[in-house]
């Protein structure tokens, strides 16, 4: 039944898009410009386009994003805004700010700091600090995960944490996120006779807090400087589809110089398409993956962290507004400024990759339960509306 609802939604989107896929006049196509992604630079949602905004043009986004991650069965909800501006014919600047992020920990017993909050270490009181023998080697903060997840369980020799938010624990983390800055360079494009579009994006996510003690109370960011670069490839398939592929490397500068936890670097891979091309209504589908590489604090859930996300949705250029202003010169001319309102809608599906090494018999629900609005075990958020489904719903 749940799968049928999803198929109905996707079918409706296809029909809705096909209805809008009428021939566009050249005047209308001028306004189908690149839109700002969640990172600020232009693209889809999390996949970037190698095509930049023209010099002097700008695009903005206000967005909400909710995902589930393991270990800990985390529900991560982020609200942010951003934008991009064309600086030259080949260079684009993108900026974004994560205004608020809320992390709900549903299975604290899968996390090292969660087990600490449950009283598994030291004096066995909730929140008691672990003794030296219970800490991870070389760490002043992260205890070894107990397996089975009991105060009397054996120390496993490895920690339990999610690489992007290692300080998540029993507390419902709620605070601001990071500031992102990216430069996107267009190398060449199909419009100039090349066989495909090619670009590169270099970016940095700047933490607003670095203190481990602060982040344990508000684990809404990793506390790490994140610097990366991606190659961006695009290809037009006639008037049928735009194809995009991103691949790169993302380095994490661990908080407190790695004394608490050493985070893994990441190889991000993504593929997306938008169909049809040059229409007011488009179906968008994204596949995004993050592969953990390099040295890090040993973790008990390595396979579960290498997740793959599938995102399906609509992009609609719904309306155009015009601003007029008179310019006083010898001929008294008029200048028109025109733009499109773009309202993306997406369906987010989480495709699990691997499993957890220590799953409790019954899920441990901590904090308030997430409410369902129409879809069982799902949520609907607005500011770029989307549906989220957990693996149990598929």
Image (tube, rainbow, N blue to C red):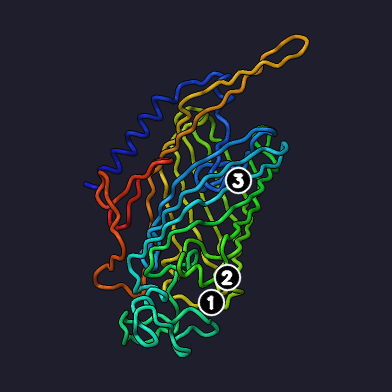
Judging by the rendered image, the residue that carries numbered circle 1 is: 260
Q: Which residue is depicted at the point 57% across and 45% down?
A: 40
Judging by the rendered image, the residue that carries numbered circle 3 is: 233
Q: CA distance from mark 1 to mark 3?
A: 38 Å
Circle 3 or circle 2, nearest the eye: 2
Whichever of labels 1 and 3 marks the residue nearer the N terminus, that label is: 3
Figure disc tally: 3
Q: Which residue is depicted at the point 36% across and 34% down?
A: 13
Q: Nearer the viewer, residue 155 or 211?
A: 211
Q: CA distance from mark 3 to mark 2?
A: 33 Å
Whichever of labels 3 and 2 marks the residue nearer the N terminus, that label is: 3
Marking on residue 21: none
Give coordinates of residue 70: x percent, y percent: 39, 65
Judging by the rendered image, the residue that carries numbered circle 2 is: 255
Q: Nearer the viewer, residue 331 or 112?
A: 331
| Disc 1 packing (10 Å; few <14; some 14–19; many ≥20) | many
Mark 1, secondary structure of its residue? loop
Decide: marks 2, 1 in contact (CB < 8 A)?
Answer: yes
């Amino acid at each position: 039944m749940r799968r049928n609802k999803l198929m109905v939604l996707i079918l409706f989107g296809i029909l809705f898009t096909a209805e809008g896929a009428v021939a566009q006049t050249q005047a209308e196509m001028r306004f189908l410009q690149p839109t700002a992604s969640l990172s600020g630079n232009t693209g889809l949602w999390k996949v970037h386009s190698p095509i930049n905004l023209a010099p002097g043009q700008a695009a903005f986004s206000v967005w909400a994003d909710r995902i589930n991650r393991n270990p800990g069965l985390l529900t991560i909800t982020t609200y942010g805004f951003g934008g991009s501006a064309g600086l030259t014919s080949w260079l684009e600047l993108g900026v974004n700010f994560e205004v608020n992020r809320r992390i709900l920990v549903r299975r604290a017993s899968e996390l090292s700091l969660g087990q600490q909050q449950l009283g598994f270490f030291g004096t066995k009181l909730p929140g008691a600090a672990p003794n030296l023998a219970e800490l991870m080697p070389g760490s002043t903060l992260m205890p070894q995960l107990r397996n089975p997840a009991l105060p009397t369980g054996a120390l496993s020799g490895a920690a339990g944490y999610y690489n992007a938010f290692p300080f998540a624990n029993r507390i419902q983390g709620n605070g601001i996120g990071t500031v992102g800055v990216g430069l996107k360079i267009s190398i060449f494009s199909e419009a100039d006779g090349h066989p495909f579009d090619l670009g590169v994006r270099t970016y940095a996510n700047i933490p607003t807090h670095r203190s481990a003690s602060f982040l344990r109370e508000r684990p809404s960011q990793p506390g790490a400087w994140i610097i990366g670069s991606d190659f961006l490839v695009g290809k037009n398939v006639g008037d049928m589809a735009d194809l995009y592929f991103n691949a790169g490397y993302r380095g994490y500068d661990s908080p407190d110089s790695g004394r608490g936890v050493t985070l893994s670097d990441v190889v991000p891979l993504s593929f997306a398409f938008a169909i049809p091309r040059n229409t007011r209504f488009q179906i968008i589908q994204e596949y995004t993956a993050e592969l953990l590489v390099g040295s890090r604090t040993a973790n008990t859930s390595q396979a579960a962290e290498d997740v793959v996300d599938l995102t399906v949705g609509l992009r609609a250029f719904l309306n155009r507004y015009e601003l007029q202003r008179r310019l006083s010169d010898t001929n008294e001319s008029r200048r028109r400024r025109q733009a499109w309102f773009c309202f993306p809608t997406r369906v987010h599906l989480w495709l699990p990759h691997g499993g957890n090494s220590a799953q409790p018999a019954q899920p441990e629900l901590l904090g308030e339960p997430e409410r369902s609005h129409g879809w069982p075990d799902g949520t609907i958020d607005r500011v770029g509306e989307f549906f989220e489904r957990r693996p149990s719903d598929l």
